[in-house]
Image (tube, rainbow, N blue to C red):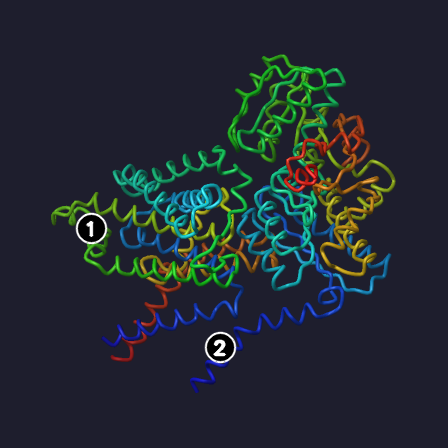
Amino acid sequence: MNSNRSVQIAYAIGLVLLLIAPSLIYPVLIMKVLCFALFACAFNLLLGYTGLLSFGHAVFLGSAAYITGHALKVWELPTLLGILVGTAGAAGLGWVIGSLAIRRQGIYFAMVTLALSQMVYFFFLQASFTGGEDGLQGVPRGTLFGLDLADDTNLYYLVVAIFVGAFWLIQRTIHSPFGQILKAIRENEPRAISLGYDVAKYKLLAFVLSAGLAGLAGATKTVVFKFATLTDAHWHTSGEVVLMTLLGGMGTVFGPVVGATVIVSLQNELADKVGSLVTVIMGVIFVVCVLAFRRGIVGESIALYKRMIGEKTR
Amino acid sequence: MKRKLLALTLSALLLPAAGSALAQAKGKISGDVVKIGVLTDMSGVYSDLGGQGSVVAAQMAIDDFKAKYKPTFKIELVSADHQNKADVGSNKIREWYDTQGVDMVTDVLNSAVALAVAKVTTEKNKIMLNAGAASTRITNEDCAPNNVVHYVYDTYALANGPGKAVTKLGKDTWFLLTADYAFGHSLEKDTTNAVIANGGKVVGNVRHPLNASDFSSFLLQAQASKAKVVGLANAGGDTINSIKAANEFGLTKNQTLVGLLTTVVDIHALGLQTTQGMMFTEGFYWNLNPETREWSRRFFAKHKKMPNMLPAGAYSAVTHYLKAVQATGTDDTATVMKKMKDTPINDFFAKNGKIRDDGRMVHDMLLVEVKKPSESKEPWDYYNIKQVIPGDQAFQPMAASRCPAVLAAKKK
């Protein structure tokens, strides 16, 4: 009960910080962080809680980004509907890729997702509606309930609402009976099968859910930046989300958020401070993370906290 | 206690608004500082083209300007590596405009990043002098002539120059090797048009995927076509790999290789042995005349590489901008843009350069042929100038413009 209370307090503090943050930090940067945090959380649902390493997750981010961009710019849909269309598109693509990929395990699963996502990437490179390597540019942000979303502050609160909603959904999923079964699959798949669970169905559902949430992140990102480019669907981005999740702490609720925050703000802040060394620094961080603290920032903090409490009671 | 907290939060919310109001109230030059940003790729595939070189060139432009004109305002330079990510570039440029008071941005390599940055620049009503990106969309479909100038080159000029000039030299049958994405397609289209318009013929073409590793089958097709010219409508690593492979297949003995996006830096990387006899268009050559040599040697002393057209263009753009600020005494976007468009550009980079209504800066381009190793007298002495292509022929004519602002003006 006590720990439950402190978790609630932690959530409340986090929410308050989010609400007042735009007066302290540049809002567009926070929106970007939130989009990537959501992306990493979606990825973590699959890697951390189901034990499936998808190496093509950027394709869901990218396809939703393009679909939303096209829906808002060409079909001129309202903003929220555009985001929903993008999310649904990514979930649909997730169903197709997922139902093919879950037939294999481990490294083969990762390779199948990578291969399929590269196929989609090259489709985006060629398709005329994406603008190829020039990107889909000039997507209007539109309005919501009469509020002009071109204003950064208005948009910021929409993004916060989307993020909080999606985060809550992930949280609920993890702690639901469905989430328990996912964890069981992660721990011991044959045992889950022997208990009578249709493992393939659960895996597919987790995959589609994760793809849809990654798509939501991509769709929101398009609205924030007003464009969608190939970077979103590139395998580099798939790698980046692995890095974010591992750095923050795989299989922890807050890990991906912390990881995404660190990576995105480093990319942004280092861009004009160290110039060409950005990529080197990222690489070093990854190596240090893998060698020295494998549970990630949040994972190690929790372990440390538990050790301290353990020592006190002893 | 609660009230105090509320008041604190409220004042924190209001603070940024108060800050920007203060900045606007001050003098004619916002914040008494003219701030110039160089946004470029410093670590990725394009970093050799612009990158750190453009930063060095912009700093030189500022130092030279200070020494020569003794401006009363301060000039500052900021630079960033956008890592070829449009979101990083767009985020950085917003931050620069909103919180750091940047007035003008230059270089902006990579078309996707440049188009994104151009949108933000227009929205915030600042100035972008693009020296790095190639897409003609910047002055056509996505043009913003009140804020964005395309300063150095574009795919039309790169394709049209050799397409016209090489065909006129009697090398009138072409085979095109095209990178299979938008950039390659537009190069292919513009080259084909130029070749046909000048009485030549494109006897065949083949498209290769982005970042292809094996060019042998494509080059065998090119060889079998017996075309006099093999045009490479690709860029970066693809160009380098296809040139190397062409050399290994002995294609260069009977056919002329024309690179459509090649600069002196690529030639330096590949060596004269591999590239001799190649032809292409570049906007600048360091060893053209005493003026270019003087500047380029100074650049070399700082950067240890001779400049290609990008850093040279960035220097020219920054200088042209600062002169306009000096002359008008303000950094107001509309005033400075008008001054820049009214004043012809005359420096080592451009002679009688002019910024058109669609934002295109028109200047002479050079058709060059790579020297044989025996002809090269010193390091970096790589080109024979075959022809100077006058600006009005090098770039897309205004009549063909697809820029909405230009089309609207025409209707009136």
Q: Position of residue B275 (x, y in %)?
A: 69, 27
| Residue A14 in view | yes
How far apart in space, not on screen, are marks 1 and 2 (Cα)?
50 Å
Residue at the extreme bottom: B1
Residue drawn at 60 percent across, 35 percent down = B236
Q: Are marks 1 and 2 in contact (CB under 8 Å)?
A: no
Above or below, comparing residue B165 to residue B154 in the picture: above
Q: Quadrant of the C terminus of chain A?
A: bottom left
**Could you say whether the residue bearing mark 1 is in a helix, strand or loop?**
loop
Q: Please give the chain letter of the residue carrying mark 1.
A: A
- The residue lying toward the viewer, choosing from A14 and B242, is A14
Q: Position of residue A145 (x, y in %)?
A: 42, 59
Given residues B36 and B142, the one toward you in this image is B142
Residue B54 coordinates in the image, percent (x, y): 70, 48
Image coordinates for residue A189, horizontal then vertical, percent: 20, 48
Question: Could you classify mark 1 by the number of other residues whose Cα lies within 10 Å: few (under 14), some (14-19), or many (20 or more)?
Answer: few
Give the labeled residue for mark 2: B9
Circle 2: residue type: Thr
Q: With B181 as the anchor, is B76 left or right in this view?
A: right
In-front residue for pair B203/A106: B203
Question: Exactly how many numbered labels are in the figure?
Answer: 2
- Identify residue for label 1: A188
- Helix, strand or loop at label 2? It is helix
Which residue is pictured at 81% across the width and 37% down the height? B287
Q: Say whether mark 2 and mark 1 are on the same chain.
A: no
Q: Residue furthest front?
A: B412
Q: As shown in the figure, which amino acid type bears the numbered disc 1?
A: Asn
Chain ID of residue with mark 2: B
* Residue B292, image quadrant: top right
Residue under the point 27% across and 51% down: A50
Q: Residues within 10 Å of mark 2 (few under 14, many from 20)?
A: some
